[in-house]
């Protein structure tokens, strides 16, 4: 893992995020670099930043093309981008000086619906992972007392959400299928996150800020490393945390060395705490395309939310076999025949509604 990677806060003002270098158009206490991000370049090398933070800054930029391009340039593959703005359907969005009124549709256009259109602007692919809506407690109480579903109220009513955050992964190398964007609501940025339920006022799924998953929930990007041919007698196992109930599939980033690999792969999922097998399926690998995400479906695991699970992959390949792409900036969660690896398998999860 590189130790020299930077974390930056763009438009930090007087409230620079701890651990970040501060960038602002004004020379204020805590500002490390004074820049106009509508035209200036970030003073960092390509692929040198692994985290970018912006809070109530982006809405002041009418045309953020230069800003977005510069973010992608300095970001490593797999860098995390966290952006907070007033929500478009709040009064705060229309305060003096705000040029753009952001809502989900901006990010869905850019990251999900029309990503190819934005490549010339972004010079990368941005993957939307998570949205967090901040709702004041008195507003939340009013919603519940009047019997409205919280997700319905957010979607159709004005004045519900005060601000919202989007959490994005910047990807330079591989395209992938999009898994469902996870949406949460919270009383503020730093309190417990409650997943937007699929039934009326479902508050059953709570992600404690103090209880962030101890194992990866997904690893969407590769560092161009892999585990080598997955031949007979080799067993790869990866620990992970399932964010939701009804885990129904796992996608793996597979390579076939530009060949048609004729073998059978066995995919198993275990409860990592008691080593109990929960699901096992077999897949013929001759349908796998080189450098592609392959979805492995199985019967949904009803009570999978917040569980630490383990998936294992093995094949009966003799001379030729598939391989799995990995990320060597994430270590300590993957084993090969029981031996810890300094890398982790690229994967992401699917959940049945």
Image: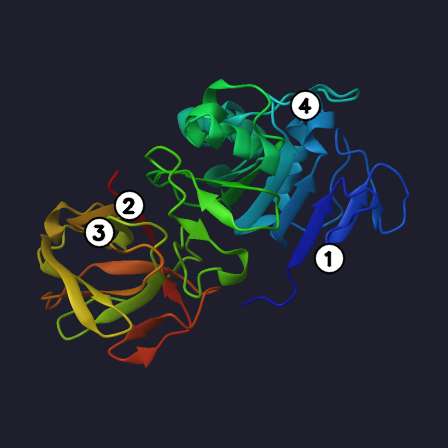
- Residue 211 position, x and y percent, is 49, 62
Up/down of 134 relative to 326, above or below: above
- Distance between mark 1 and mark 4 Cα atoms: 26 Å
The residue positioned 28% from the left and 59% from the top of the image is 324
Q: Within 10 angstroms of label 4, few (less than 14), some, or many (20 or more) residues?
A: many
- Distance between mark 3 and mark 2 Cα atoms: 13 Å
The residue positioned 9% from the left and 58% from the top of the image is 263
N-term-proximal mark, 3 vs 1: 1
The residue positioned 53% from the left and 51% from the top of the image is 192
Q: Within 10 angstroms of label 2, few (less than 14), some, or many (20 or more) residues?
A: many
Q: How is the image coloured?
A: rainbow
Q: Which residue is mark 3?
A: 302
Q: Within 10 angstroms of label 1, few (less than 14), some, or many (20 or more) residues?
A: few
Q: Which residue is mark 1?
A: 18
N-term-proximal mark, 2 vs 4: 4
Mark sitting on residue 93: 4
């Amino acid at each position: 893992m590189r130790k020299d990677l930077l974390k930056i806060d763009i438009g930090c003002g007087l409230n620079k995020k701890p651990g970040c270098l501060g960038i602002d158009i004004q020379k204020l206490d805590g500002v490390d670099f004074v820049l106009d991000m509508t035209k200036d370049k970030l003073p960092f090398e390509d692929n040198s930043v692994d985290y970018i933070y912006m809070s109530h800054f982006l809405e002041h930029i009418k045309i953020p093309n230069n800003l977005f391009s510069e973010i992608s340039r300095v970001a490593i593959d797999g860098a995390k981008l966290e952006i907070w703005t007033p929500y478009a359907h709040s009064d705060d969005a229309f305060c003096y000086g705000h040029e753009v009124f952001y809502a989900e549709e901006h990010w869905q256009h850019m990251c999900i619906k029309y990503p190819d259109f934005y490549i010339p602007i972004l010079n990368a692919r941005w993957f939307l992972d998570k949205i967090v809506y901040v709702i004041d407690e008195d507003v939340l109480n009013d919603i519940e007392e009047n019997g409205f579903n919280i997700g319905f109220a957010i979607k159709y009513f004005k004045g519900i959400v005060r601000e919202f955050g989007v959490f994005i992964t910047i990807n330079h190398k591989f395209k992938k299928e999009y898994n469902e964007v996870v949406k949460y609501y919270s009383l503020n940025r730093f309190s417990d996150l409650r997943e937007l339920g699929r039934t009326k006022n479902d508050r059953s799924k709570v992600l404690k800020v103090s209880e962030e998953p101890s194992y990866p929930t997904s690893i969407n990007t590769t560092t161009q490393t892999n585990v080598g041919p997955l031949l007979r007698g080799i067993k790869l196992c990866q620990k992970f945390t399932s964010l939701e109930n009804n885990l129904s599939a796992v996608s793996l980033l597979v390579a076939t060395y530009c060949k048609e690999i004729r073998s059978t792969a066995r995919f198993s999922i275990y409860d990592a705490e008691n080593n109990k097998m929960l699901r096992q399926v077999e897949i013929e690998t001759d349908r796998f395309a080189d450098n592609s995400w392959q979805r492995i479906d199985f019967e949904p695991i009803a009570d999978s939310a917040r569980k630490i699970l383990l998936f294992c992959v093995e094949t009966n390949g003799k001379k030729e076999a598939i391989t799995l792409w990995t990320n060597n900036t994430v270590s300590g969660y993957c084993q090969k025949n029981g031996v810890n690896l300094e890398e982790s398998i690229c994967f992401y999860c699917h959940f049945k509604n």
